[in-house]
Image: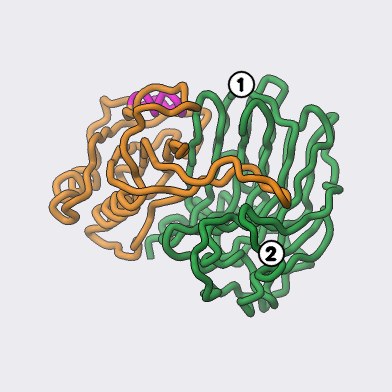
C-alpha cells in the first residue's frame, strides 16, 4: 500500500526534476482507474481542491511558483513519457491539521497511471478472514516544497476491490 | 543523497531513546528470503480490547529496512480500530519495493481508505509511534514527539493493535535471526490512563500456511520481537 520516492538519489540542478519525476513514476506503478463507485468513500471527486479540503489544507494560490516548480513543469512529461500529471497547483500552504506543510510554498501534483495496491486491514487472528485484500488507487496527491524540492507528504485514496 | 535533504526534518521527528534491547553493533540488512509471492498477509501481532472506548495506542518500534519486491510490503505499526465496519487509524514504518516511508493508513466514512506518507525515519533507529483518539473523535498521530496529522472522524475505537506485517511471502518480515524487529513498550490508553499491553502476541496469516515455518516470535505483550527465519540479520 505504497508508492513514491523511487530512484531519488540524483541531486544537483535537476533535483526537483528527479524527485518529482520519480514520484510520478512511483505512483504510475500503482494508480488504478479513477473510482466511479467507492462504497466506503463519502468524499468529493478527486481534485486538488477537494483533497485539500478533505485534508484541511488551505492553499494561497497568490504565491508565484518557485524556480524548482517551473523547471519541473517544463520537463516532467518530456523526461518521462507515459506518465501523466493531470493537475497541479502551487501556493503557500496552511494547515493546523497537517502541520508538515504549514507555511511552505508548495507544489501539489495529482497524477494518474495504472496498477493495484495491497491494503492492510486490522490484523487477523488464526482462522480469521482478511477484511480487505487488494485495491486500486483512485486519487494520489503529492506535496513538495516548491523552493527546495523537499518531499513533504503524499497521500492516496484507495478503492477496495470487491 | 536525496535523503540528506530530509535530515533536519528527520531530526525533528526522531525520538531516539537508548533502549536496552538494542546493542550498538546491530545493523539491519535487507535479505531476500527466497520465497515466492503468495497473495497473503502474515502478522506478528497483538490485539487488545480492554474497554468499550480505547483512547490511544503506542509502541517504540525498531525502524528496519527489509527486502521487498514486486507489489509486496513490509510494515511495523500500531493501530486503533473499531466499528462500524473496518474503521481504523494506523501508523508505522513501511517498506515497499521502491521506498521506505512513515505511513499512516486511515479507514472511515470520510476518508474511505487513505494512505498518508511522510519521509522515513532512519533505518536502524527506534521511534515511538503513537495515535490518540479523544472523546470528540479527534485522531492525533505522532512520530516521536512530533504530531504529523490531526483529524476529526466519526467513529470510536475499541481495539488497539501492534504488529509487524507483510503482504506477499516473498517479502521479508522485518528483522533477522540475530537482529529482530522490536515492538517495545506497547501501551494502550483507556479509562484515562496508559496501560501496558497484556495480550500475548501471536503469528498469523490470511492464508492457510503455518507462519511459524517462516517467522519467529519472542517476548511478551509489552515487549515482543519477531524475525524472518531466512535472514541472519
Question: Where's the C terminus of chain B, which quadrant?
Answer: bottom right
Q: Is residue A87 left or right of residue B66?
A: left
User: Label 1 belongs to which residue?
Assistant: B154
Identify the residue shown where x is 55% and y is 41%.
A132
Toward the front, the furthest residue is: B208
User: Label 2 belongs to which residue?
Assistant: B210
- Pinpoint the chain carrying mark 1: B
Residue A81 x, y percent position in the rendering: 16, 53
Q: Nearer the viewer, residue A134 or A54?
A: A134
Categorize mark 2 by other alpha carbons within 10 Å: few (<14), some (14-19), many (20+): few
> Is residue B11 a member of the stretch shown in magenta?
no
Numbered mark located on residue A45 in the image: none
- Pinpoint the chain carrying mark 2: B
Residue B44 x, y percent position in the rendering: 70, 58
Residue B5 vs A130, above or below: the answer is below
Residue numbers of the magenta segment: A49-59
Check the rendered structure and report the hue given to chain B: green
Residue B194 x, y percent position in the rendering: 82, 39
Residue B120 vs B191, above or below: the answer is below
Q: Is residue A46 left or right of residue A102?
A: left
Residue B227 vs B118, above or below: the answer is below
> Is residue A52 a member of the stretch shown in magenta?
yes
Q: Nearer the viewer, residue B197 or A76?
A: B197
Could you give the CA–CA distance between mark 2 and mark 1, rounded to whole angstroms?
A: 37 Å
Categorize mark 1 by other alpha carbons within 10 Å: few (<14), some (14-19), many (20+): few
Who's orange, chain-wise? A
Residue A117 x, y percent position in the rendering: 43, 48
Mark positioned earlier in the residue sequence (2 or 1): 1
Specify the quadrant of the image occupied by residue B31: bottom right
Q: Is residue B48 left or right of residue B104?
A: right
Amino acid at each position: 500500500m505504497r508508492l513514491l520516492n523511487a530512484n531519488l538519489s540524483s541531486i544537483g540542478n535537476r533535483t526537483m526534476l528527479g524527485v518529482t519525476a520519480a514520484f510520478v513514476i512511483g505512483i504510475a506503478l500503482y494508480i488504478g482507474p479513477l473510482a466511479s463507485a467507492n462504497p466506503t468513500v463519502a468524499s468529493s471527486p478527486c481534485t486538488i481542491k477537494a483533497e485539500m479540503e478533505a485534508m484541511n489544507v488551505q492553499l494561497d494560490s497568490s504565491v508565484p511558483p518557485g524556480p524548482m516548480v517551473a523547471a519541473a513543469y517544463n520537463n516532467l512529461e518530456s523526461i518521462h513519457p507515459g506518465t501523466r500529471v493531470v493537475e497541479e497547483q502551487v501556493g503557500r500552504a496552511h494547515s493546523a491539521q497537517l502541520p508538515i506543510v504549514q507555511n511552505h510554498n508548495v507544489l501539489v501534483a495529482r497524477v494518474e497511471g495504472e496498477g493495484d495496491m495491497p491494503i492492510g486491514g486490522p490484523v487477523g487472528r488464526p482462522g480469521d478472514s482478511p477484511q480487505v485484500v487488494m485495491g486500486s488507487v483512485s486519487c494520489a496527491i503529492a506535496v513538495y516544497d516548491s523552493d527546495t524540492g523537499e518531499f513533504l507528504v503524499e497521500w492516496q485514496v484507495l478503492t477496495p476491490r470487491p | 543523497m536525496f535523503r540528506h535533504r530530509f535530515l533536519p526534518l528527520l531530526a525533528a521527528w526522531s525520538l531516539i531513546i537508548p533502549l536496552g534491547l538494542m546493542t550498538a553493533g546491530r545493523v539491519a540488512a535487507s535479505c531476500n528470503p527466497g520465497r515466492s509471492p503468495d497473495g497473503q498477509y502474515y502478522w506478528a501481532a497483538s490485539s487488545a480490547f480492554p474497554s468499550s472506548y480505547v483512547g490511544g495506542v503506542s509502541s517504540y518500534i525498531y525502524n528496519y529496512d527489509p527486502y521487498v519486491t514486486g507489489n509486496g510490503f513490509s510494515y511495523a505499526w500500531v493501530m486503533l480500530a473499531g466499528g462500524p465496519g473496518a474503521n481504523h487509524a494506523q501508523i508505522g514504518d513501511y517498506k515497499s519495493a521502491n521506498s521506505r516511508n512513515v505511513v499512516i493508513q486511515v479507514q472511515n466514512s470520510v476518508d474511505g481508505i487513505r494512505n498518508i506518507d511522510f519521509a522515513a525515519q532512519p533505518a536502524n533507529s527506534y521511534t515511538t509511534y503513537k495515535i490518540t483518539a479523544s472523546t470528540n473523535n479527534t485522531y492525533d498521530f505522532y512520530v516521536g514527539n512530533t504530531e504529523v496529522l490531526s483529524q476529526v472522524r466519526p467513529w470510536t475505537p475499541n481495539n488497539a493493535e501492534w504488529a509487524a506485517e507483510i503482504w506477499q511471502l516473498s517479502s521479508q518480515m522485518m528483522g533477522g535471526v540475530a537482529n529482530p524487529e522490536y515492538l517495545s513498550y506497547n501501551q494502550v490508553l483507556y479509562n484515562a490512563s496508559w496501560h501496558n499491553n497484556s495480550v500475548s502476541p501471536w503469528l498469523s496469516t490470511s492464508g492457510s500456511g503455518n507462519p511459524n515455518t517462516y517467522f519467529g516470535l519472542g517476548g511478551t505483550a509489552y515487549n515482543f520481537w519477531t524475525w524472518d527465519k531466512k535472514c541472519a540479520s
